[in-house]
Amino acid sequence: MRQEVRFSGFGGQGIILSAVILGRAAVMYDSKFAVQTQVYGPEARGGASMSAVIIDDEPILFPKVTIPDIYVIMSQEGFEKYGASAQEGAIMIIDSTLVHSRPACTCIEVPATKEAREKLGRDIVANIVMLGALVAATHVVSESAIERAILDSVPKGTEKLNQSAMTRGFELIKERGQSA
């Protein structure tokens, strides 16, 4: 089944890394096909950035996300630029710490930045909290696949912190019973 996922936030939040990790999880650990693309300009640090992943059981012939099924939005500007026009049937996971608007589609609120700061002591892992929440809510890839892909992708010496961030994302969805 083809699923199109769009990540958006501001430069420096790990938006592109999140998409790369998700694609890696799908291809390397869940035996699926995936294509990842990204958009950022001179505003990359601080301005809106976007990355997308297509995951499918079949080879992907057209590598551009056209109508995302799933959104992961980590900033208000990212919402306005890349998420405000979400289709009614889409699922949007938002960082409720930083995104104040709500879409017309199904919305799952995850206080990722707050949790990363308060529970883990590092804002920088908010994207990994969001990846954990994404997987727990949508099952776009398996939990074991995302864990292995995260551990493959993060800087050496940060594996335990990132694993804790991913686990916190899983827990936030399970605590709220917000599986889509």
Image (tube, grey):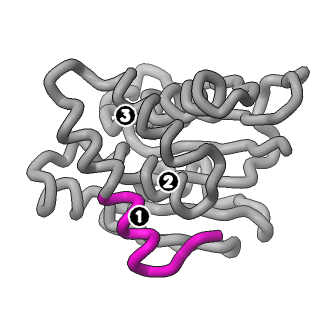
The residues bearing labels 2 and 1 have C-alpha atoms spaced at a distance of 8 Å
Badge 3: residue crowd in 10 Å (few <14, some 14–19, many ≥20): many
Q: Is 179 situated left or right of 3 in this image? A: left
In the image, what residue occupies the spot 65% across and 48% down?
140
Residue 71 visible? The answer is yes
Q: Is residue 180 above or below residue 119?
A: below
Residue 172 located within the stretch drawn in magenta: yes
Name which residue type carries label 3: Gly
Q: Secondary structure at mark 2?
A: strand
Q: Count up the numbered dots.
A: 3
Quadrant of the frame with the N terminus: top right
Q: Residue 24: percent from the left, percent from the top?
A: 56, 25
Q: Which one is earlier in the sequence, the residue at label 3 or at label 2? A: 3
Q: Is 67 situated left or right of 51 in this image? A: right
The residues bearing labels 3 and 1 have C-alpha atoms spaced at a distance of 16 Å
Specify start and end residues of the magenta stretch as a single range.
168-180
Q: Is 125 situated left or right of 134 in this image? A: left
> According to the image, label 2 marks what residue?
73
Check contact, mark 2 vs mark 1: CB within 8 A.
yes
Residue 36 falls in image quadrant:
top right
Q: Is 35 situated left or right of 160 in this image? A: right
> According to the image, label 3 marks what residue?
14
Relative to the observer, which residue lies in front, 68 or 167?
167
Relative to the observer, which residue lies in front, 53 or 32?
32
Q: Residue 97: percent from the left, percent from the top?
A: 31, 66
Relative to the observer, which residue lies in front, 52 or 28?
28
Q: Is residue 72 above or below residue 35?
A: below
In the image, what residue occupies the spot 78% across and 62% down?
87
> According to the image, label 1 marks what residue?
99
Name which residue type carries label 2: Ile
Name which residue type carries label 1: Val
